[in-house]
Image (tube, rainbow, N blue to C red):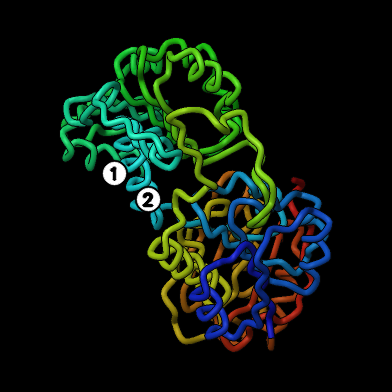
Amino acid sequence: MQRALLLENVHPLAVSILQSAGFEVETRKGALDESELIEALEGVSILGIRSKTNVTERVLRAAPQLEAIGAFCIGTNQIDLQAAAARGVVVFNAPFQNTRSVVELALAEIIALTRRMTEKDRMLHDGVWDKSANGAHEVRGRTLGIVGYGNIGTQLSIVAENLGMRVVFYDTAEKLALSNAHRMDTLEELLETADVVTLHVDGRSGNAGMFGAKQFARMREGSIFLNLSRGFVVDYAALRESIISGHIAGAAVDVFPHEPKTKGDAFESDLRGLPNVILTPHIGGSTEEAQESIGRFVAGKVRDYTTSGSTELSVNVPNLQLAPSGVGRVALLHRNVPGVLAEVNRILADHGANIEGQLLATRGEIGYVVTDISAVTERGASKKLGRMETTIRLRLLDDLEHEELPQGPAVPA
């Protein structure tokens, strides 16, 4: 029986899906550091994580049995995707499943900060009655500036317009403006226009430190700032100075450069104790609905890969899906060099094999070919396929699934 390890409180539905597919599933509540993860992965073929566990090249090198990683979240910057692909480890994430939850949190925070609800709440808890409209505004008629117009940014754009907000956005990629949203040519133009600036950028390394003192200075006096994307994209010391000076009227932050690994651990931030600042512990996608949806989606993708070879929506290898044909299936991840498919078919032909179906896809340095054929191991072709110099990982599925095979050299990470 194959083993799966799920960390960081992955939804129980994921456990059920993998168990139904024949996996022995171990779950752990918290994240693991590099050495702990290497030890825990012994004999494990499926790893499930969220945002706090880092899967490094060292981890991947020490886990030769690992076949797939499920990131039960949107981001995959915690995984060395190139090293994973080079070792035939397929990675899946959940690009859409928690977008609504993040959007609703962002909207709730925009309204709360614009009405200065955090300060009114704190004063009443301190026994002080302060019924005043000073500094409180409706969101209707105000301008929302969205930095990063992806799955979350676009959905936030639509819902915010329904509340009567004007929406402008900035993205480095060409994106279609939805409804009445207006694209800004530069980030600076957006900052000078928006009453509320919210970040929804991805975790690529180039976004590190993209928002600091210079950007806060360009924002409008009395504007509001939100970051529900990645902690490392913002200089929070600069944000603190802008709030203390009064230039920024309020902020909401859900992500931090260094986050505690487990519930109850100490938390430190430059933003603690500031007025009209909402701090949340990376819960943008943490609703029961979103986590259930993520658990179903990612576990399903991992299950489909292990049982049928489907890599549809994988983030690090070629995407390919071949309908079942009722015979054995050979799934070959390989180096993307000329002649691989011809060599595969020559080996199969030399062994008298009849191909029932075949698909090939490539992605950068990696190629993936899935071939349906009857009783391929009985003809000895699989061992020759496994020994090809271009082979990264060879898997035999259906009635031949998970046979131990010799593997060719991996692509250097």
Q: Amino acid at mark 2?
A: Thr
Left or right placement of residue 151 versus residue 407 in this view: left
In this view of the protein, which residue sits in the foreground, 99 or 42? 99
Residue appearing at x 35%, y 13% in the figure: 220
Q: CA distance from mark 1 to mark 2?
A: 8 Å
Residue 194's label in the rendered image is: none
In this view of the protein, which residue sits in the foreground, 368 or 376? 368
Report the quarter where the C terminus lies: top right
* Residue 287 coordinates in the image, percent (x, y): 42, 59
Residue appearing at x 48%, y 75% in the figure: 13
Vertical arrangement, residue 233 with respect to residue 47, above or below? above
Q: Is residue 281 visible?
A: yes
Quadrant position of residue 26: bottom right
- Given contact means CB atoms under 8 Å apart, are the residues at marks 1 and 2 in contact? yes
Q: Amino acid at mark 1?
A: Gln
Vertical arrangement, residue 199 with respect to residue 90, above or below? above
In this view of the protein, which residue sits in the foreground, 366 or 209? 209
Q: How many marks?
A: 2
Neighbourhood count class around disc 1 (C-alpha, 10 Å): few under 14, some 14–19, many 20 upward: some
Q: Is residue 337 visible?
A: no
Residue appearing at x 65%, y 66% in the figure: 29
Left or right placement of residue 16 versus residue 395 in this view: left
* Residue 397 coordinates in the image, percent (x, y): 59, 80
Q: Secondary structure at mark 2?
A: helix
| Residue wearing tag 1 | 155
* Residue 217 coordinates in the image, percent (x, y): 46, 10
Neighbourhood count class around disc 2 (C-alpha, 10 Å): few under 14, some 14–19, many 20 upward: many
Residue 99's label in the rendered image is: 2
Quadrant position of residue 346: bottom right
